[in-house]
């Protein structure tokens, strides 16, 4: 049972009302999110911090999963690997494009490409795995 973009937005707002992420699209084992970059997202040196990039990638995988299997609050990250490829722009939103590459009963693997908005150059590549809780009757 999949969840719609509207259902996912309502769930995220109820569980994490201070979330700064914008869900651009979700469906077909994919999700696209964006995050406006402000001073809170920058590290010394004036670039977007690594933890900010990791967090948008992690939530993009989670959103794609919710779109695929429905609202599952206890789906949790079991691994997240990131390759930083180039410096993201400090004055443009970060865009996360996620595709689920394996959807199993217990584990789901997703791949995320991160970009500075308006650029075709990937700033980071992320692969993450989520554990899906067993269904209870």
Image (cartoon, grey):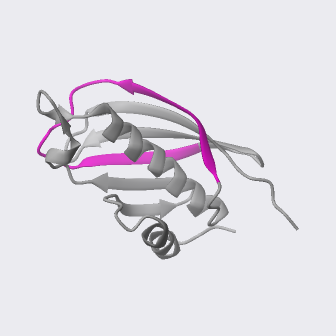
Queried whether the magenta region covers residue 77, the answer comes back as yes
136 on left or right of 86 = right
Residue at 47%, 44% in the rendered image: 58
Q: Overall secondary structure of the magenta stretch?
A: strand
List x then y, in percent, for residue 135: 81, 60
List x then y, in percent, for residue 70: 64, 66
Residue at 11%, 45% in the rendered image: 91
Queried whether the magenta region covers residue 16, the answer comes back as no
- Quarter in which the N terminus is drawn: bottom right
List x then y, in percent, for residue 69: 66, 61
**96 up-or-down from 22: above or below:** above
Residue at 43%, 28% in the rendered image: 82
- How many numbered marks are there? 0
- Quarter in which the C terminus is drawn: bottom right
98 on left or right of 56 = right
Chain part drawn in magenta:
75-100
**40 up-or-down from 73: above or below:** above
Q: Which quarter of the figure has residue 32?
A: bottom left
72 on left or right of 10 = right
Residue at 80%, 54% in the rendered image: 134
List x then y, in percent, for residue 114: 34, 39
Q: Camera-side residue: 8 or 40?
A: 40
């Amino acid at each position: 049972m999949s969840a719609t973009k509207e259902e996912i937005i309502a769930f995220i707002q109820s569980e994490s009302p201070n979330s700064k992420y914008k869900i651009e699209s979700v469906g077909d084992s994919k999700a696209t999110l964006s995050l406006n970059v402000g001073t809170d997202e920058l590290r010394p040196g004036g670039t977007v911090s690594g933890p900010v990039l990791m967090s948008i990638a992690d939530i993009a995988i989670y959103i794609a999963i919710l779109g695929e299997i429905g609202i599952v609050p206890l789906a949790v990250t079991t691994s997240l690997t990131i390759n930083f490829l180039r410096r993201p722009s400090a004055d443009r939103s970060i865009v996360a494009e996620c595709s689920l590459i394996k959807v199993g009963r217990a584990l789901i693997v997703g791949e995320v490409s991160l970009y500075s908005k308006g650029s075709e150059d990937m700033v980071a590549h992320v692969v993450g795995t989520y554990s899906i809780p067993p269904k209870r009757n």
